[in-house]
């Protein structure tokens, strides 16, 4: 059994980190990881571990050479996500897997955002641990899993019964596990039947229309190597939080970076790592599409976003006059 079911992506990430890294170990992780990884590795540092955080380029991609350069004789784990949750940018995990294998270091991949949107082959990646989450694939919230390669020894985080081969005590969430399995099956089918390609075309239409109408807008992490559903757009000079509120009023749900860090005063750690200023980060919002999205909805979102932006511009003009 190489799969341990968990309560979601957060638990899978935490299990991969705390289950592997010894108190005096060294971790190499990217600076754009989800907080489920970043906060966990920082916690590991509080109790003795060492951490090297990898930079990313302007597009939000980790350079495998930086991974190589960060390794020390004490490195016990490399953790780099497959696709970023804020920008959708796909990371070079196959190349990093090769480096990890060559140096005999365990490699964890947070594939929470990639699952159902990209084909995942743990052999091709060459990873030892990989996290997924049900609700990112239209599955039930509170379900997830950690792939643990046969032979990898991992300390449990939860102690109790011998469930999951002693790796995670506690009665299994059978309904969640069944839902996760079905979601994974349907997600895999969607890779082959053109569903993801269709979502990508809608996302491109959305970006094209918004950028055509608003010349001060730009896509953060614009790259061909992005998962199909994510679009992170910066409306230079606009208060993203206000835009988000107006859009919400108009019936459009978008996100300001990561939903899990909505209260950050310093802007998104992902956009900041890509070289954006706090102001640029705070003028960015994320649109997420799915297989349920339609071209009519895209048109409506473009229309409502333009309405919201003109409202913000006129509010600014009124403020300047008064
Ligand atoms: N990792 C990534 C990349 C995510 O996007 C998320 C959730 O948004 C998580 C981990 C956490 O997963 P969960 O919400 O299932 O705990």
Image (cartoon, helix red, strand yellow):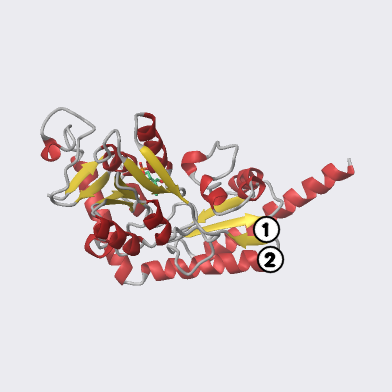
Q: Is residue 133 left or right of residue 237?
A: left
Residue corresponding to mark 2: 213
Q: Considering only order in the chain, which callout, 1 or 2, is on the residue closer to the N terminus?
A: 2
Q: Residue at x 61, y 49 (%)?
A: 281
Q: Residue at x 34, y 60 (%)?
A: 96
Q: Nearer the viewer, residue 222 or 203?
A: 222
> Disc 2 and disc 1: Cα gap in Å?
8 Å
Q: Nearer the viewer, residue 23 or 296?
A: 23
Q: Is residue 27 above or below residue 82?
A: above
Q: Is residue 187 visible?
A: no
Q: Helix, strand, or loop for circle 1?
A: helix
Q: Nearer the viewer, residue 137 or 296?
A: 137
Q: Is residue 295 left or right of residue 172?
A: right
Q: Is residue 105 visible?
A: yes
Could you tell me residue 156's position as x and y percent? 20, 35
Q: In the figure, residue 232 lies in which quadrant?
A: bottom right
Q: Which corner quadrant holds the C terminus?
A: top right
Where on the image, by quarter, is ligand 1?
top left
Give residue 306's mark. Answer: 1
* Disc 2 to disc 1: CB gap under 8 Å: yes
Q: Dot 2 surroundings within 10 Å: few (below 14), some, or many (20 or more)? A: few
């Amino acid at each position: 059994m190489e799969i341990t079911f968990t309560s979601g992506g957060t638990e899978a990430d935490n299990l991969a980190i705390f289950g592997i890294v010894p108190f005096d170990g060294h971790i190499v992780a990217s600076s754009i990881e989800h907080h489920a990884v970043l906060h966990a590795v920082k916690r590991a540092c509080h109790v003795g571990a060492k951490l090297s955080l990898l930079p990313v380029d302007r597009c939000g991609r980790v350079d495998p050479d930086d991974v190589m350069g960060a390794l020390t004789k004490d490195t016990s784990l490399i953790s780099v996500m497959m696709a970023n949750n804020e920008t959708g940018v796909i990371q070079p995990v196959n190349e990093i897997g090769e480096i990890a294998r060559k140096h005999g270091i365990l490699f964890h991949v947070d594939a929470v955002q990639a699952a159902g949107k990209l084909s995942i082959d743990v052999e091709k990646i060459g990873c030892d641990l990989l996290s997924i989450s049900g609700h990112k694939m239209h599955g039930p919230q509170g379900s997830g899993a950690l792939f643990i390669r046969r032979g990898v020894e991992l300390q449990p985080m939860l102690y109790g019964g011998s469930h999951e081969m002693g790796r995670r005590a506690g009665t299994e969430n059978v309904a969640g596990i069944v839902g996760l399995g079905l979601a994974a099956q349907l997600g895999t089918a969607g890779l082959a039947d053109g569903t993801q390609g269709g979502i990508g075309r809608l996302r491109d239409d959305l970006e094209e229309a918004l950028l055509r109408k608003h010349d001060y807008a730009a896509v953060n992490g614009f790259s061909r190597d992005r998962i199909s559903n994510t679009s992170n757009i910066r409306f230079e000079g606009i208060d993203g939080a206000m835009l988000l509120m107006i859009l919400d009023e108009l019936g459009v749900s978008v996100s300001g970076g990561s939903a899990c860090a909505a209260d950050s005063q310093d802007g998104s750690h992902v956009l900041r790592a890509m070289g954006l200023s706090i102001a640029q980060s705070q003028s960015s919002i994320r649109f997420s599409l799915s297989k349920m999205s339609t071209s009519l909805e895209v048109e409506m979102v473009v229309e409502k976003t333009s309405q919201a932006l003109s409202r913000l511009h006129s509010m600014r003009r009124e403020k300047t006059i008064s």
